[in-house]
Amino acid sequence: MTASDTTVATAIPDTPGQPPEVSSVRMIMTMAGIGIISGILLVFTYMGTLPTIEKNKAEALERAIFDVVPGASSKLTFTPEDGRLRLMDPSEKPAERYYAAYGNDGELVGIAVEASGQGFADIVKVLYGYDPVCQCIVGFKVLATKETPGLGDKIETDPAFVANFEALDVSLSADGTTLANEVVFAKPGKKINPWEVEGITGATITSKAVQKLINTSAMNVMVILQNNIQVLRDGNTSSQHTDQD
Amino acid sequence: MNTASSMSIFLNAALINNFVLAMFLGICPFLGVSSKVDTALRMGGAVTFVMLVSSVCAYGINKALIFIGAPYLQLIAYIVVIASSVQLVEMIIKKFSPALFRALGIFLPLITTNCAILGVALFQTAKQYDFIQSLSYAAGAGVGFIIALVLMAGMRERLELSSVSSVVQGAAVTLILAGILSMAFMGFAGMAS
Amino acid sequence: MATPAASIQTKTSSESAENFIKGLWRENPVFVALLGMCPVLAVTNSAINALAIGAASTFVMVLSSTIVSLAQKLIPKQVRIASYILIIATFVTVTEYVLQALSYEVHKALGAFIALIVVNCMILGRAEAFASRNNLRQAVMDALGMGVGFTVACLSLGTVREILGNGTLFGFQVLGSEFEPWIVMILPPGAFFVLGMWLLLFNWIKHRKEAAE
């Protein structure tokens, strides 16, 4: 061993170069033992908390849906398959999901749709409620945001901004293949048309981001929803297994 | 799945959401190893390498865990992989550059507890990046870490030569400097969109 | 004259108290040893988040120190760091799932920083420096003290940042509605500044004490 090696050995305790005082078998057994015990503990914790966590998630989602579709009291989840919508099986986890919300009388009140897009800092995720009768967006809720507190996060708190989504026009064109008017951005105080999203002073980038992601989502989703409107309306009566209440 | 481009992910991790100055990952080495530009560069390099290795492994592990349906093993698997990568890097550096090994000293094994590395693995999984995106993310995080460390080291080297009240010396002034740096980096926001 | 048994008992309790208290001030993990800084800066933009991360970290630390102390004779020296990390990671994962079940919102607010508790150098540091060399009771006291000290440090940041940056404390409005929030406080630079200020204050107090003696 050279002088430099000993300096290293004293500077960093227990380097791999030191002679082992304990057999390798003992070391492996210890690690394995800890691994097994930890594995068992984790499996138990996971299994034990899973039902509660799933329940919490479902409750949070339902609250959000009823928030953006006012007047709804029950919901069904649909997923697209080959351009048509069908009821989602509770065991599935498809990427595209639309939540049809029904009133007390079983009538379709609206459909909640998730949309996300790049904001100022990170991805912004929203849930918006669509009324197929007026063909407009009637509710809006931010699900996840890492925008600047006090500035970008005004998309959640600014009443004028939220009011954008109380009757945002997303009606389809005459041939029903695209939006009659794309959702566009309007400077604060300059909103004239019902398909414009008025920005927030001091939070232009975030409010523009919301407008963009709503537009992208609406362009794709509104057509699908309108084409399958009967399936959505019948949802409550035709299905055998519902996830109401 | 996530549709962001590799370049925007790289810039995001390096500048806009700098791991140290915006996300507070890797603060311990940031405060501990940033007194000399030289050491800062080398530490940053080692960390970046470990980040890239861990990113690749994390991607594979995540796929495997989903496949066997054991998501609760994620944290343990990641930390084991990181510890092993650090051990690997330690052996490589010791073999090829004993001088660097001595210079880094205790900080090399401490890379294991560098939250920035675990942060890369956890965040890339949460954002559901694919393989190339994950690599861009890790590369960006590493570069951002190096930038933050070198900038801080540069400032502290200058500070040593000037007279600062003893009350402020040490961690206090480093933190205040970090705050100013962090504010400066906030100017990068909005670059990627 | 105290009997030997009674004096041993007193020694143990005062030792326990000593081990607990040192974590609060003299050997405070954040302000003195500068350990575990990442969560202190990251998750303290509101008082409730600060309290949550402090409590979660304390929980993990007490459990880990317990196991490490109990198993100190069983773990070979060469694999001790790896073993400690494995033990800590297990408890962090458990804490994460339990927290998610108890309060979905708090879990969402803390995000990845619960998982990052595993690399909080404070926990590994105490396991290695203390829990592995002392009996169960002292190890638990040490862990508790360090944990509480850590929570106090988190709260010292969380309260200042929330009051100055939002005008609220634990969600309740404390400063008048005319108060223009000092937004930078809830942003990353604010965390650095506030912690820097606290350290400055403590240094200044220390200097005054030393000058007076």
Image (cartoon, rainbow, N blue to C red):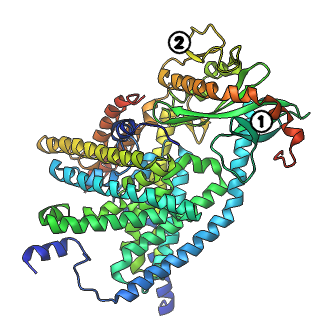
Which of B62/C6 is in front? B62
What is the residue that sits farthest to the left in this orientation?
A3
Q: Pick whichever, C105 or A178, lies toward us.
A: A178
Q: Position of residue A232 (x, y in %)?
A: 80, 34
* Residue at 49% over, 57% down: C115
Chain letter behind tag 2? A
> Residue at (37%, 67%) from the top-left corner?
C125
Residue tagged by mark 2? A187
Task: Give SS at disc 2.
Answer: loop
Image: B7 above or below C198: above
Q: Quickly name the residue at label 1.
A: A100
Quadrant where the C terminus of chain B sits is top left
Chain letter belonging to callout 1? A
Where residue A204 appears, as percent x and y from the top left, is: 49, 20
Residue C212 location, x and y as percent?
A: 26, 53
Residue type (three-letter) at the residue carrying disc 2: Lys
Instruction: Look at label 1 and name its amino acid.
Output: Ala
Q: Alpha-carbon neighbours of circle 2 within 10 Å: few (<14), some, or many (≥20)? A: some
